[in-house]
Image (cartoon, grey):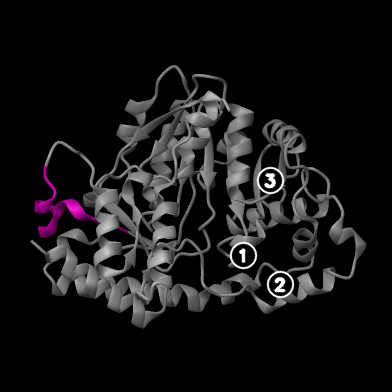
Amino acid sequence: MLLSSRVKGITDSITMKLNEKALNLNDEGKVIYNLSGGQLPIKPLPEFIENIHHQLNFLKSYQYSPVLGFPALRKKLSAHMAEQRHLPLDIFENDYDCIISNGSKHSIYNCLGALLDSGDEVILLAPYWVSYPEMIKFWGGIPTVVKSNVFDAFVPSIDDIKKAISPRTKAIIVNSPNNPSGIHYSEAWMRDFAAFLLEFPDLIVISDEVYSEISYFDPKPSFFYQYDHTLLSRTIIIQAISKSLASTGLRLGYAIGPSAVIGAMGKIQGQTTSGPNSLIQRALLDFDFKLIDSFLMPVKFHVRQNAATLREKFREANLGHCWYQSTSAFYFMLDFSRTPMFARFEGEQQDFSYKIADELLNDEGITVVPGSDFGIPNSARISLVIEEVPFTEAIIKIVKYLKRV
């Protein structure tokens, strides 16, 4: 059967293959340390679970919702965003709208579909989330990557972003707090980025803020549009309950932006998936978002403790030059290129991320995500969410591996 060229152009997920291999090794009795997890290993708040239980009794929980989501919830989410960002509470009431989708990935996909024509360029800041380039290419766009490195804690240069602008540039995706680096861009960077945007009035910003409530070092994340509210007229904010409510499997994300863009996203959604999950939407209608802060406090403490363990083990092994301070989300990027073991990987090949990840799994029983998927060669993303004892054991194994000549 002949497949479309569009589908043939999508890259397979090597990560999924490594995860499948890890499961097989675990079934064979090998101890596996899973440092690839992109979700919290806990249940959501009891109050949210109780709301879901309560809504099970109502017929509307099992019927179609409006394509854009329930109007009352869309209004509530917009008000919550304004409050969280210290914006005027009425700022999203007139020329803006909110659409609820089946996860933040769905929101970004619909957003790109609403914005891109064939050949339009979208700037990505490496490291970037793995699905960005594939979604851009699927809609006929062209990803343009701006690189960063561990020396700058993976913060991209505004000057480098300027150099990436071309007559075909349509949009830029900003992901702060960042998956996979586990950092958020500073207030100074956000102010400079806001000033940069004023120089390019036609540039659209997709601001992926899914991890905004998981930061464990002050100052907390800030956002460019907080320093110039006019920038909201060309910004689409992406959010979800996946991380802040430990609900990745419930698949509910949302986007807030100019009404014209949100309406176009609704057209795509209406002809593909229709409205999002009615049950979860109804449970959120009666949920108090102010409970999230207290819910996440022990989570952030735990992630910070694991980040401290990582720092200590690296310094004890004289690998401090490979470490940087993670501040948010729950990830860290391992840079292999400046470690003793990297001398073993020589040849014409430029990137050994997959090979090293496979070796870590086979030799040490540790699953990581190859950095190539995030636009950073010779690296890997590790997750900081597993329990303290197995995390410490895994880091000790990784350190010994990195020191191996």
Question: Which of the 4 quarters of the picture holds residue 52?
Answer: bottom right
Question: Which residue is identified by label 1?
Answer: 247
Instruction: Choose the circle earlier in sequence order: 3 or 2.
Output: 2
Q: Which mark is residue 48?
A: 2
Q: Amino acid at mark 2?
A: Phe
Q: Amino acid at mark 3?
A: Ile
Q: CA distance from mark 3 to mark 1?
A: 28 Å
Compared with 135, 321 (above or below) is: below
How far across and how far down the image is residue 56, in percent?
84, 69
**Which element carries disc 2, helix, strand or loop?**
helix
Compared with 69, 339 (above or below) is: below
Nearer to us: label 3 or label 2 = 2
Asked if the residue under mark 1 is in contact with the one under mark 3, i.e. CB atoms within 8 Å, the reply is no
Which residue is painted at 67% across and 50% down in the image? Answer: 102
Seen from this angle, which residue lies furthest right? 59
Q: Nearer the viewer, residue 333 or 308?
A: 333
Q: CA distance from mark 2 to mark 1?
A: 10 Å
The answer, for residue 178, to whether it is visible in the render is no
